[in-house]
Amino acid sequence: MQLIDTHVHINFDRFAQDIEAVRERWREAGVVRLVHSCVQPEEFASIKALADRFAEMSFAVGLHPLEAHQWTANMGETIATRALREPRVVAIGETGLDFYKADNPQQQKEVFVEQLKIAQRVNKPVIIHCRDAAFEMAQILRSFWDEYGRVEGVMHCWGGTPEETQWFLDLGFYISFSGIVTFKNAKALQESACQVPKDRLLVETDCPFLAPVPKRGKRNEPAYVRYVAEKIAELRGVSLESLASETTENANRLFSLI
């Protein structure tokens, strides 16, 4: 059985002391590929160094919505150039909207659209972060589709209702579920996990955040994506092996991993 963790942040300091042990555990759990997301372009060197060290790792480059205040035109060119020149860059992101704490929604929207344009220019999918902004996100994507054409991508660490999930399925997006889907009170999200067609479903950890049950409250790591897959397989009434095969095929397709 093989799994792909489609969203990790293992360049964070919390992994500095035991990254080799973390790698052994993800390999033992059947995780054969990782997609490392990017919060800001300054991380590029540290993420690339990890990809140099771990052949199973591909990565993204982009600017997180909570860092939108850092955006410059030069940053956009940096993202595009790195995506074009580094063959292991498989996506733009993570980008998107986060209205949970931020007070700059307009700036976030503008920076998000700029990164959609970059993704289209370099022919890469987008990794989308969307928190408390599903309605606005869907509006922007529909408008972008009408004006510029479609961009492929994934709604990462998805936490939306079934209605919101359908908006993004209708836009052609993949939906990726994290450890949140294992939480006892995540009933609407669990319903969404059953709703997504099998050819649009992905799994992730978003580590070091949001460790799934039975590791909740601990540092998350790529090996724990197996618990996410197990829960979704249970919810959908399929075998873990089947769910793993489907999500691995989907990740390979979206990110052109093979």
Image: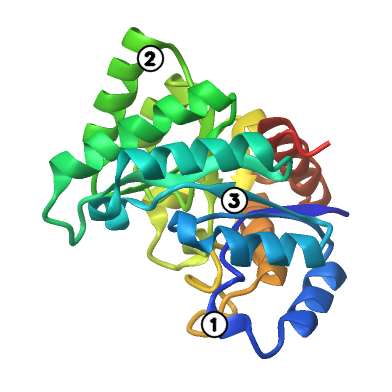
Q: Disc number at residue 241?
A: none
Q: Secondary structure at mark 2?
A: helix
Q: Quadrant of the N terminus?
A: bottom right
- Residue drawn at 36 percent across, 26 percent down: 167
* Mark 3 crowd level (few <14, some 14–19, many ≥20, 10 Å Cα): some
Residue that numbered label 2 is attached to: 145
Q: Residues within 10 Å of mark 1 (few under 14, many from 20)?
A: few
Numbered circle sitting on residue 235: 3
Is tag 3's residue or tag 2's residue first in the polypeptide sequence?
2
Q: Position of residue 22 (x, y in %)?
A: 74, 79
Q: Residue furthest left?
A: 103
**Between marks 1 and 2, how big is the CA–CA gap?**
38 Å
Mark closer to the chain start, 3 or 1? 1
In terms of depth relative to the viewer, which is nearer, 100 or 186? Answer: 100
Which residue appears at 66% of the width and 32% of the height?
A: 254
Give SS at disc 3.
helix
The correct choice, above or below, for 102 with respect to 147 in the image is: below
Residue 77: x percent and y percent? Answer: 45, 37
What's under tag 2, amino acid-wise?
A: Trp
Q: Which residue sits at x=14%, y=50%?
A: 104
Q: Are marks 1 and 2 in contact (CB under 8 Å)?
A: no
Which mark, residue 13? 1
For label 2, count other residues whose C-alpha is less than 10 Å away and answer few (under 14), some (14-19) or many (20+).
few
Looking at the image, residue 2 lies above or below residue 116: below
Q: Amino acid at mark 3?
A: Leu
Q: Which amino acid, mark 1? A: Asp
Q: Quadrant of the C terminus?
A: top right
Mark 3 and mark 2 residues within 8 Å of each other at the beta carbon? no
Query: Please, what secondary structure does the residue beneath circle 1 have?
Result: helix
Q: Position of residue 164 (x, y in %)?
A: 33, 35
